[in-house]
């Protein structure tokens, strides 16, 4: 029995030891795993704030990308809209010049009154030739002059049937400054597409980006000047002979100022532009109304309207329609003749600009839809786009008005039945240099 108990006890002890051994072996790896896990968790803990920092940065980049994308879409849309409007303009190739003709119709106010004394005509021809470096002369005429001398040639004196012998000589180069952009605004008296007409209105719009000013200079249509390849004549004849290109060349030759580009409209386009802005408010006198009504009657005939349509009964302040405003701008024989006429033209243009500045987006769209198809220009599309992009800046520039010839620099003459203006070219050139170029 004792031996059996001893054996039993020994047997019971052995299993306990056997059980204890494995437990110890299993616990050791478990503790190691826990410790390793704790260590890993501890080592990863500092990386959690970095992820939180990266998340706002990611959101910022996404928002920035959306903003840039929207801005890009809007920019593309804006460019497309601008070029849509540019596409409405009649843009001519600057390399293609207008045809120069030998014969033009006489001006509508040539009279049978005697010409100025021949010595006075010779004097102005000499002044012009010295200024331009040419040998242009006055076209011969069989009209009597005040000194009762005559010459033998056609009576109209405006046809230009024979070209003068022009020998260019060294001359002063035209004024130029990269900060000044000169655009000649031409209003023609053309009644239809086949009739070139004459330049009834010539206004040089100069944008000086350095002085931040805009200058509007009218060239009076009766100014007696040298026309390249032609006899000396009124400046408005240059357009009749060779269109906008010859007119720009004529101004550059006589006034030594570089003209970059031109913009042209005719009678009917002018009327539609005024109507598109809702008319212009102008105060007119009784004397002006009388002459206006004559021009309005002429326009009614061309437009097929009743003779009294749009005529005014008396002087006063009116919101003039396009037809009435055109009649107002054409007045020459009230007040200070053509001097006041050019002032009327600038006044109407300023009224239009003021109205355009105050337009809403929808009103501006309606205006451009009407105005742009009526415009002919040699300004390339790229330059038009640049002008549009800077338009808001230019509208803040003050506008100054001038006239050529300036006061005290001119005198009256009659040549070949035409009332013309002789002038001191040096004084007028210096005025342009000082006012436009600030030199």
Image (cartoon, rainbow, N blue to C red):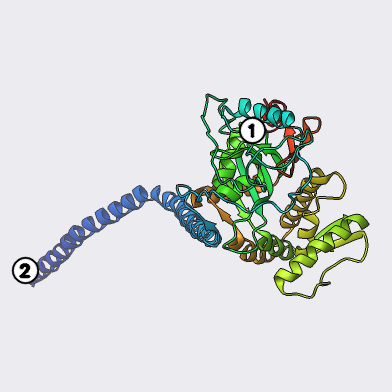
Taking depth in this image into account, of 409 and 277 the one nearest to the observer is 409
The mark found on residue 157 in the picture is none
Quadrant including the C terminus: top right
Residue 374 appears in the rendering: yes
**Which residue bears the numbered disc 1?**
255
Q: Tell which of 393 and 296 is nearer to you.
A: 296
Q: Secondary structure at mark 1?
A: helix
Q: Image check: 79 left or right of 46?
A: right
Q: Position of residue 325 (x, y in %)?
A: 78, 59
Q: Is residue 77 left or right of residue 33?
A: right
**Please, is residue 291 above or below residue 215 in the view?**
below
- Disc 2 packing (10 Å; few <14; some 14–19; many ≥20): few
Distance Cα–Cα, label 2 vs label 1:
146 Å
Crowding near pointer 1: few (<14 within 10 Å), some, many (20+)? many
Name the residue: 77% across, 54% down. Answer: 330
**Residue 317 placement, left or right of 23:** right
Q: Sequence-wise, which precedes: disc 2 or disc 1?
A: 2
Image location of residue 242, percent across then percent down: 55, 48
The picture places residue 84, in percent across and down from the top left corner, at 53, 62
Q: Which residue is mark 2?
A: 3
Quarter of the picture containing the N terminus is bottom left
- Residue situated furthest left in the rendering: 3
Is 388 left, or right, of 36 in this rendering? right
Identify the residue at image location x=55%, y=50%. Answer: 384
């Amino acid at each position: 029995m004792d031996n059996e108990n001893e054996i039993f006890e020994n047997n019971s002890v052995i299993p306990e030891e056997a059980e204890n051994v494995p437990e110890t072996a299993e616990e050791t790896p478990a503790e190691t795993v826990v410790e390793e896990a704790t260590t890993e968790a501890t080592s990863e803990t500092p990386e959690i704030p970095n992820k939180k920092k990266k998340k706002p940065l990611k959101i910022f980049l996404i928002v920035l990308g959306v903003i840039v994308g929207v801005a890009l879409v809007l920019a593309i849309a804006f460019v497309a809209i601008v070029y849509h409007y540019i596409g409405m303009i009649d843009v001519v190739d600057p390399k293609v010049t207008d045809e120069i003709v030998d014969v033009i119709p006489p001006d509508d106010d040539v009279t049978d009154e005697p010409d100025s004394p021949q010595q006075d005509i010779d004097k102005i021809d000499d002044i012009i030739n010295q200024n331009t470096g040419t040998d242009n002369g006055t076209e011969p005429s069989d009209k009597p002059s005040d000194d009762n001398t005559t010459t033998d040639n056609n009576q109209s004196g405006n046809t230009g049937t024979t070209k003068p012998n022009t020998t260019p000589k060294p001359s002063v180069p035209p004024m130029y400054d990269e900060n000044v952009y000169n655009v000649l605004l031409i209003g023609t008296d053309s009644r239809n597409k086949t009739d070139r007409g004459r330049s009834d209105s010539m206004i040089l719009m100069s944008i000086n980006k350095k002085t931040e000013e805009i200058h509007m200079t009218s060239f009076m249509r009766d100014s007696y000047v040298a026309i390249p390849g032609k006899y000396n004549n009124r400046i408005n004849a240059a357009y009749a002979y060779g269109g906008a290109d010859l007119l720009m060349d004529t101004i550059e030759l006589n006034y030594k100022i570089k003209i970059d580009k031109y913009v042209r409209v005719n009678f009917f386009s002018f009327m539609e532009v005024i109507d598109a802005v809702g008319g212009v408010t102008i105060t007119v006198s009784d004397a002006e109304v009388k002459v206006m009504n004559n021009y309005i009657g002429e326009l009614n005939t061309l437009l097929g309207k009743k003779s009294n349509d749009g005529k005014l009964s008396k002087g006063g302040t009116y919101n003039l329609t396009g037809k009435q405003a055109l009649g107002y701008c054409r007045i020459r024989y009230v007040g200070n003749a053509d001097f006041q006429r050019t002032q009327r033209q600038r006044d109407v243009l300023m009224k239009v600009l003021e109205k355009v500045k105050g337009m809403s987006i929808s009103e501006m769209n309606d205006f451009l839809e009407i105005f742009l198809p009526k415009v002919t220009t040699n300004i390339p599309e790229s330059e038009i786009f640049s002008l549009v992009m800077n338009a808001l800046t230019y509208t803040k520039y003050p506008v100054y008005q001038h006239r050529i010839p300036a006061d005290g620099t001119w005198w009256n003459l009659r040549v070949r039945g035409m009332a013309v203006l002789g002038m001191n070219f040096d004084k007028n050139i210096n005025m342009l240099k000082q006012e436009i170029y600030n030199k």
